[in-house]
Image (spheres, rainbow, N blue to C red):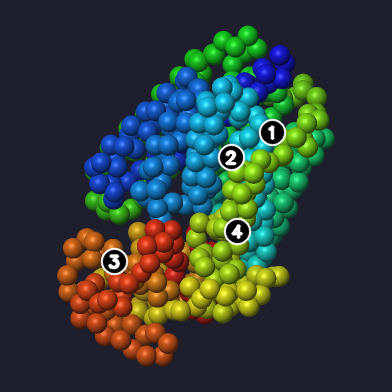
Amino acid sequence: MAMNEDNTARAIAFARLWAVACLFNLIAHWDLQSGTGVFVAKAAVLALAAWVVLFPGGALLAVLAVLYAGIAWVDWPRVNNHGVLMFVVHLFWVGVFLRSRLAGVRWENAFARSPAPALRVFLGVLYSWAVVHKLNAGFLDPVWSCASTELLKLADARLFGIPLSFLPSGPATRVLSIYGTLLIEAAIPLMLFFPRTRRAAIVLAVGFHSLLGFSYPAFSSMLWALLVLFLPADAAARLAGNREGRIQRRAWITATLLVGTAAVGTAVGFAQASAPELSAVRWSLPFLRHLFLLYTILLVVRSWPAFRASAPDKSIPQAFRLRPVGAILAAVLLLNGAAPYFGIKATQSFAMFSNLNVAAGRSNHVFIPASWQRFGLRTDLVTIQSSSDPVLDQLSRPQWAGAPDNRSFSSFNRPPLDAAERNPPRWKLPFHALKRRMLELEKRGEAGVLLSYERRGQTYVVLSAQDDPELTDLPWWMRKFLRPRVVPEGAENTCMW
């Protein structure tokens, strides 16, 4: 009986926190680019996620997973790094739930036997690649490192109107942020694996990702749901409800109303924006940053007494026991993380803000050489000389920012801290990224796109690029799954998404 109660508590706690993570991610990536239909669909999924927070259950969670995965599929390849993991989790849960219904097994027990162990492994894969990708010359350089820029972003932030400029951000602190990040991200998955260090790992993860949550609240909210799977049974029960099974909803109702208010404010503000191609995160971040902090405090206050009083859980060997489908998906996530080193792609491979640059036959990684780049998708590069398309034309001039982030390719970049003393780089574009842009322009009905570019030492001038067969011939899987990233020329260590 006790084991069934523990399974129910963990499953309900996960369902609630995962639904909250869906809320945060829907709000953070709310936009108008996909049309009115997708906008309305996202609003409906937002309402369903709020309902799952209040009334968690296997069937509702499965419906939420189907709808959320459907929205992600429509948005692909604009899905971000942790969005790939969320997509896999949603599909996995739907399959497990359907199988449990056919077998007559309670969803809580099915969750404990299959999704919960797999999700623990998935979290380990995410952390592992986050550390491996950061072992490069760029991340270890205090001037170029994403850790340094994130530290300065935190110092520029405001907490309930109070500036955080008092936080240390000098040269020594920047070096500490680099090696501290590596140490913490490597320690968390290792400590989660062993029973005696698991609670310390949770405390470390909550502290670390609460800081990151100021810039990336959607990402950290997803981690809260996955970390619940490592909580002691009593602490998970506190987040699910009391021991008698009565669901205490008052705190969750308050949190859901706050999230809903942020969603409405974000939607209204973004609908009035003059630049609809911009991500709604620029409008929602002030809401989400403070909302995430309140949400984290709620979770800690509610679970801390049971968390502190609980004994170490000895069930860790069974906690990571994968069934075949879970093992296959874990292998897929591992291969996805390796994609940059094989020359396939740089985005959506858990290399977010790692300074990793493996392209054009170069590699700034400490251990992994450029010779691994066998597929060549990031070695066939073009240089844009001029274009009537403003996005492409922006790549024709040396600059730190690159081109704006858009559907065709990603080029979000942060300059080094001494950018004023350096010459900005010239940007190159993978040839298949240029094709994606032409297809996007063709889809939007653009006509007479002028383009001049250099490829493999030869210059091409095209008067109607969106109609050129060579520039619009792209396999469906590359159109759907690859979102290329521009390549800086002569600046191998830039901090990019």
Counting other residues with Cα less than 10 Å from the Cα at mark 3, is it few (<14), some (14-19), or many (20 or more)?
Answer: many
Answer yes or no: is residue 476 visible.
yes
Answer yes or no: is residue 141 visible.
no
Between label 1 and label 2, give the one nearer the viewer.
1
Residue at 62% x, 74% y is 372
Per the rendering, the mark at residue 205 is none
**Near-viewer residue (441 or 179):** 441
Identify the residue position indicated by label 3 in the image.
439
Image position of 432 with respect to 205: above or below? below
Give the structural element (helix, strand or loop) at label 3.
helix
Between label 3 and label 1, give the one nearer the viewer.
3
Label 3 and label 2: CA atoms lie apart by: 36 Å
Q: x, y percentage for residue 425?
A: 46, 77
Q: What type is the residue that disc 4 sits on?
A: Leu
Q: Which of marks 1 and 2 is nearer the N terminus?
A: 2
Label 1 and label 4: CA atoms lie apart by: 25 Å
Q: What type is the residue that disc 1 sits on?
A: Phe
